[in-house]
Image (cartoon, rainbow, N blue to C red):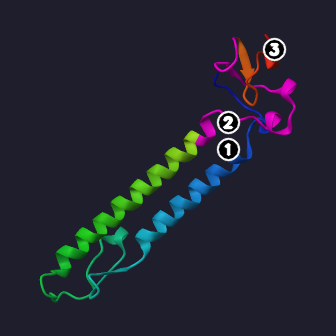
Amino acid sequence: MLGVRTQKEFTRGQKLMPAIALFIMVLAIGWTLLPFEFAEGVKCGPAITGGKAKNEESVGLIIPKIDCRNKARSRLLTSALISLAAAAAGTAVVALQQISPQCYLGNHDECSYWWANLVGNSGLGCQCECHESSSPY
């Protein structure tokens, strides 16, 4: 059942995960803002600005103008995928039902989340109990 939940119905993990996801996203974006060195000899600008080569002369088989741009694209894609994974994980942790704080405290009568009691005989069970006796039905 989707609906508005009060502050008491969120677990510590559900409260912390958005901050952790945002922190990971900021790190991923920050990584694209840093200049980088390609193949231990070619200095490139930040990936978010296109990764322009600081010097244009080739070193062996490396062509700085092309290789810096390609490496910058790779860094941008990696950063985007890390940000997407952090957002998905944060959304999943908040959206999926975890064991409620009432269950953590041992207040099974106040448990507001019930699910199918597949381990017990029948009926519904509190998230932290697998016994038919814990069901209000």
* Residue that sits furthest to the left in the current view: 61
Task: Give the image location of residue 109, x and y in percent.
Answer: 87, 24
- Residue 3, placed above or below residue 87: above
Task: Give the image location of residue 13, x and y in percent.
Answer: 68, 47
Q: Secondary structure at mark 1?
A: helix
Disc on the earlier residue, 3 or 2: 2
Residue appearing at x 45%, y 50% in the figure: 84
Mark seen at residue 98: 2
Q: Quadrant of residue 20?
A: bottom right
Camera-nearest label, 3 or 1: 3
Please state if 23 lies on the left or on the right of 126 as rendered: left
Nearer-the-camera pick, 22 or 122? 122
For the C terminus, the quadrant is top right
| Amino acid, disc 3 | Pro
Residue range in magenta is 93-122
Instruction: Quote the CA–CA distance across marks 2 and 1.
Output: 8 Å
Mark seen at residue 136: 3
Mark 2–mark 1 contact, CB under 8 Å?
A: yes
Residue appearing at x 56%, y 42% in the figure: 91
Please state if 127 lies on the left or on the right of 85 as rendered: right
Q: Secondary structure at mark 2?
A: loop
- Residue 52, placed above or below residue 27: below
Residue 7 within the segment the image draws in magenta: no
Instruction: Quote the CA–CA distance across marks 3 and 2.
Output: 19 Å
